């Protein structure tokens, strides 16, 4: 096993740059709409992120690839909302209005999680 995986360090180089740039632009779109940078951290209930994620995820099924409001790919908006959802789930348990489950207490245990 490569040393950096053994030590639990994520291989961020595996993330595609062009897709990451689209997601960053989705975050910027929020700022352009008047939201304050990072004002979603620790404030917005998880259900709001999930609702937005699902709206953008389902739009391509209806033939709408590009978001009419922003002109961006709906998938970039999905990823943006997913990142906000994950961050707030892991760091702000008080925002979890989706279920009675609480976030994992040891975030380092994610390093040993297999994603399929």
Image (spheres, rainbow, N blue to C red):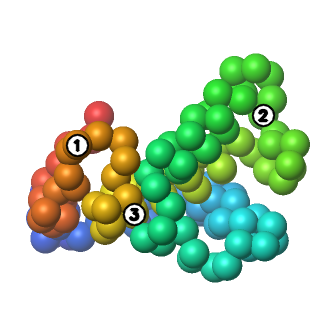
Instruction: Tell us which disc is closer to us: 1 or 2.
Output: 1
Relative side of 44 to 23, left or right: left
Horizontally, residue 61 falls left or right of residue 107, namely: right
Alpha carbons under labels 3 and 2: distance apart: 26 Å
What distance separates the C-alpha of mark 1 from that of mark 3? 18 Å
Task: Name the residue carrying label 1.
Answer: 100
Mark 3 neighbour density, 10 Å: few (under 14) some (14–19) many (20 or more): some
- Which numbered disc covers residue 87? 3
Q: Earlier in the sequence, mark 3 or mark 2?
A: 2
In depth, the one of 109 and 4 nearer the eye is: 109
Image x and y of residue 104, in percent? 17, 56
Which residue is drawn at the image coordinates 37% and 47% (left, top)? 97
Image quadrant where residue 4 sits: bottom left
Q: Is residue 11 visible?
A: no
Q: Quadrant of the N terminus?
A: bottom left
Extreme-bottom residue of the structure: 37
Residue occupying image coordinates x 44% and y 51%: 46
Q: Which mark is residue 65?
A: 2
Instruction: Kindly check if marks 3 and 2 are in contact, taking CB atoms under 8 A apart as contact.
Output: no
Mark closer to the chain start, 1 or 2:
2
Q: Does 11 sit left or right of 67 as displayed?
A: left
Q: Position of residue 33 (x, y in %)?
A: 80, 67
Task: Choose mark 1 or mark 3, whichever is in front.
Answer: 1
* Whether residue 64 is situated above or below residue 18 in the rendered picture: above
Foreground: disc 3 or disc 2: 3
Q: Which type of secondary structure does the marked residue at label 1 adopt?
A: loop
What element does badge 3 sit on?
helix
Which residue lies at the image location 78% right of the left edge and 73% below the top edge? 34
Between residue 4 and residue 80, name the one nearer to us. 80
């Amino acid at each position: 096993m490569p040393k950096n995986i053994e030590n639990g360090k994520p291989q961020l180089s595996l993330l595609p740059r062009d897709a990451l740039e689209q997601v960053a632009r989705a975050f910027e779109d929020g700022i352009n709409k008047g939201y304050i940078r990072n004002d979603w951290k620790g404030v917005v209930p998880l259900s709001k992120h999930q609702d937005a994620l699902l709206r953008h995820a389902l739009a391509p099924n209806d033939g709408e690839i590009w978001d009419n409001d922003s002109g961006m790919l709906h998938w970039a908006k999905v990823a943006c909302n997913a990142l906000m959802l994950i961050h707030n789930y892991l760091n702000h348990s008080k925002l979890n209005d989706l279920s009675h489950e609480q976030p994992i207490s040891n975030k380092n245990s994610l390093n040993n999680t297999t994603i399929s």
